[in-house]
């Protein structure tokens, strides 16, 4: 038997732009008020008959968001002009690696980062990241 929890994390503002192989409006630096929802499960409940206290999961994941993404510019490795600018201006930024900073890659990236920091007995099933209330990306490995 598996028990699954859906946990909505704290929303966070961040800026980004999509530059590689893309010529639409998202090519310009812009921001979103992102929101992430994660789904976790465990094969058995703990001694309090819970998967894990919601507040523990929120604390762990929200801290990672605050430290890395909250009020940051999410930048790709290859966006050197933007990377140089944020460094020069001493702006908070987060390098997402060799990918466009799309919501699809952000959800995938956050999934693997959260897997590293959640307790070992918890399975991260999926993460859904919203860049606005009508647009999101669901990632599950």
Image (cartoon, helix red, strand yellow):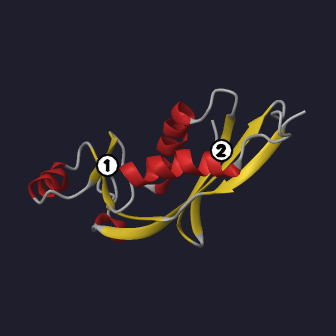
Per the image, label 2 sits on a secondary structure element best described as: strand
Decide if residue 125 is on the left or right side of residue 133.
Answer: right
In what element is the residue under mark 1?
A: strand
Left/right placement of residue 38 relative to residue 46 reads: left
**Vertical position of residue 133 compared to residue 58: above or below:** below
Q: What is the x, y in percent for residue 13? A: 41, 66
Q: Residue at x 69, y 34 (%)?
A: 123
Residue 126 tag number = 2
Query: The C terminus lies in which quarter of the figure?
Result: top right
Pointer 1: what residue?
Answer: 94
Displayed quadrant of residue 90: bottom left
Point 46% across, 69% down: residue: 33
Task: Say above or below: 71 vs 58.
Answer: below
Q: Give the percent coordinates (x, y) of residue 55.
A: 64, 51
> In the displayed image of the protein, which residue is found farthest to the left?
88
Res 1 label: none
Residue 105 at x, y percent in the picture = 46, 47
Is residue 24 something that shows in the picture? Answer: no
Residue at image coords 69%, 50%: 54
């Amino acid at each position: 038997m598996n028990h699954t929890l859906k946990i909505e994390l704290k929303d966070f503002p961040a800026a980004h732009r999509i530059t590689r192989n893309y010529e639409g409006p998202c090519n310009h630096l812009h921001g979103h008020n992102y929101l992430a929802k994660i789904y976790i499960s465990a094969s058995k409940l703990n001694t309090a008959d819970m998967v894990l206290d919601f507040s523990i999961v929120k604390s762990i994941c929200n801290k990672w968001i605050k430290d890395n993404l909250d009020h940051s510019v999410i930048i790709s490795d290859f966006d050197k002009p933007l990377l140089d600018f944020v460094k020069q201006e001493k702006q908070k930024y987060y390098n997402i690696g060799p990918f466009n900073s799309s919501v699809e890659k952000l959800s995938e990236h956050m999934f693997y980062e959260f897997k590293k920091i959640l307790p070992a007995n918890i399975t991260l099933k999926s993460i859904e990241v919203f860049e606005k209330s009508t647009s999101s990306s669901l990632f599950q490995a």
